[in-house]
Amino acid sequence: MGNDMSAKSNIDAAAADEKQKVPQIPGYTIEKPLGKGAMAAVYLAVQNALERQVALKVMASSLSVDETFRRRFVKEGRIIGQLSHQHIITVYDIGEYEGYYYMAMEYIGHGTLRERIERGMPPERAVSILCQIAKALGYAHGRGFVHRDVKPANILFRDDETAVLSDFGIARGFDESTRLTMAGWTLGTPNYMSPEQALGKTLDARSDLYALGVVFYEMLVGARPYKATDSISLALKHVSEPIPRLPDNLAIYQGIIDNLLAKDPNDRFAHAEELIKAATHVQTTGKAMPPPVVKRTETVTPPPKPPAVSPAPPSKKTWIGWLVGIVLVLLLGGAGAYLAMNRNVVTPTPTPQPVQPPKIANVSEQIASHLRIAAANLNIGFLISPYNLNATYGYCEVLKLDANNAAALRGLDDVARAYAQQPETNRDELHLALGMVQGCLGSAPNNPSLLSLRERIQQQIGQSQ
C-alpha cells in the first residue's frame, strides 16, 4: 500500500508540473510540443543524423527521480522494440540525458481514433479498424505481452486507412505477474477495463480483447457501453451490468460484442485470430455471427435447491454495498491518480452513485455472483468488515443457498488464514463481525474456519474491553 500511495503522489506531482521546460536531447532538435500527460510530454522533433521527423517522448521530470517509473518507461521502449508489426508503432531510440528519460518513436500525424469516433464512422470502417488492432494485439500476445491499456487515444493513424497501436507503458509479459497493483490500476483506464482488471485479478490476452470490444462498441454507436460520474462506479458497471444491446441497424454485430464483452474471460474469443475470423464473416456475408463461437471451458453444475426456510435473495441495497466494497480500496489509492491524468475530469472524485444490480435468473447464478464478489473482497483484504462488504459475508450467503458448496468452504479457509495474518480490526466492527459469523455457523455449524474466526474475533473483543 505504501508503494502505491507513493506512486500516486508522484503521478499527482507530475500532473501539476505544468511549466516543465523543454528538454535538450543531444541528436534531436525539438520543433514543437504534440501533447502532454501525467507521465510524459511528447514533442515533434527531428532526428538530426537521419534528418527525419520523430515523436520524442520525454518522461516528466517529477517522475524521473522515481525508480519505478524509470523502469516502466524504459520497459515500454524495450517492449515496442521487440515488436515489429505494421499496426504497432515503431521505436527508433531510447535513452537518458541529464536526468531526462526519452524515447524516439515513429511520428504518426493523422490523428487518433478518439478524434475519428467524435466525427462518426460507418460500420464497415469500424470493422476494418477492429481487425487491424486485433492483428496488432494478436502479434503482441503471441510474443508474450498483454497491453492492458487499449483505448481510442492509444490508437493512431499512419495514414487515412492504417491504424497503429501505441503506448505500451503498462504492458506486461505473460511470464511476469500480471495482477494489477493499485498503482497499475490507476494507470489503466476504467472506461475500457475488463472486469478481471477492475477486480485486480490475473490478466491475459482476453483482457485486451475486452478493452477492444469496448472500443468497437464505441466506434459503432459513438458512445461507450457503460457510463458513470466517476471511475469507481464505472468499474462496478464493467463488473456487474449486462452487456448493452446495439441499435437494430447494427444488430448483426451483436454476437461479436457479446463475445468481446463477456464478463467471464472463458466466454470471450480465446485469441485475436478468432475475433478477426468472426468479424470478417459478418462483414463479407452481412449475416450475424453464428453462435456459439466460443464455448466455456468449464461446466457449472447447478447446486441443490435451497431449504424452504432459506432467506430471500439479497436486497438491492445489500447488492450495492457489496459492489461498492469490491473497489473501495481502489477509490482510496487509485481514483485520484486516474482523474489527475484526464484533463476533462474535475477533481475531487464525486461520490459514487448507486449501481443497479444485475438481474439474477436462478440460484446457480446467485451463487456464482456471490462467489465472484466474495473473492474480490478477499483479494483486496475485506475479510470480516465493513459489515456486509466483506468476503466472509459473501461466502456465508453462498452457504445459505448451498450448505456444501466447495468453493465457499475453500473461500472461508482462505479468509481464516488471511485473517490470522492481519488480526487488527476496527473495534466498532468486531461485534458486527461476530454476529455475522454466528449467523453463518447456522448454515455450517462445524466449519473449522468459521469456528476459528469466531474464536479470534471473541479474543479481540475481550482485548478491546
Image (cartoon, rainbow, N blue to C red):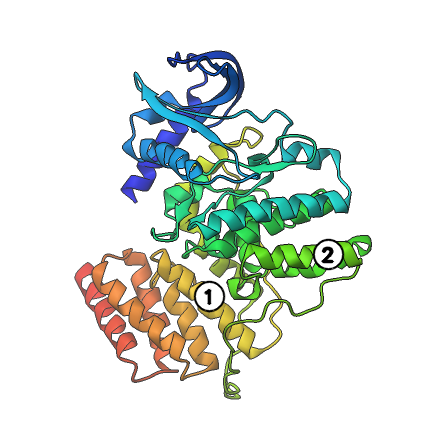
Q: Who's the residue at 57% across and 41% down the image?
A: 151
Residue 417 placement, left or right of 393: left
Q: Are marks 2 and 1 in contact (CB under 8 Å)?
A: no
Q: Quadrant of the C terminus?
A: bottom left
Q: Earlier in the sequence, mark 2 or mark 1?
A: 2
In the image, what residue type sits under mark 1?
A: Arg
Residue 425 percent location from the top left of the image: 27, 57
- Residue 252 falls in which quadrant of the image? bottom right
Distance Cα–Cα, label 2 vs label 1: 29 Å
View extreme (left): residue: 463
Rendered residue at 52%/62% (across/down): 265
Residue beneath disc 2? 253
Q: Secondary structure beneath disc 2?
A: helix
Give me the residue at 38% from left, 32% from top.
73
Q: Which mark is residue 372?
A: 1
The crowding category of the residue bearing disc 1, from other C-alpha atoms within 10 Å (few below 14, some 14 to 19, many at least 20), is some
Residue reaching furthest to the front = 50
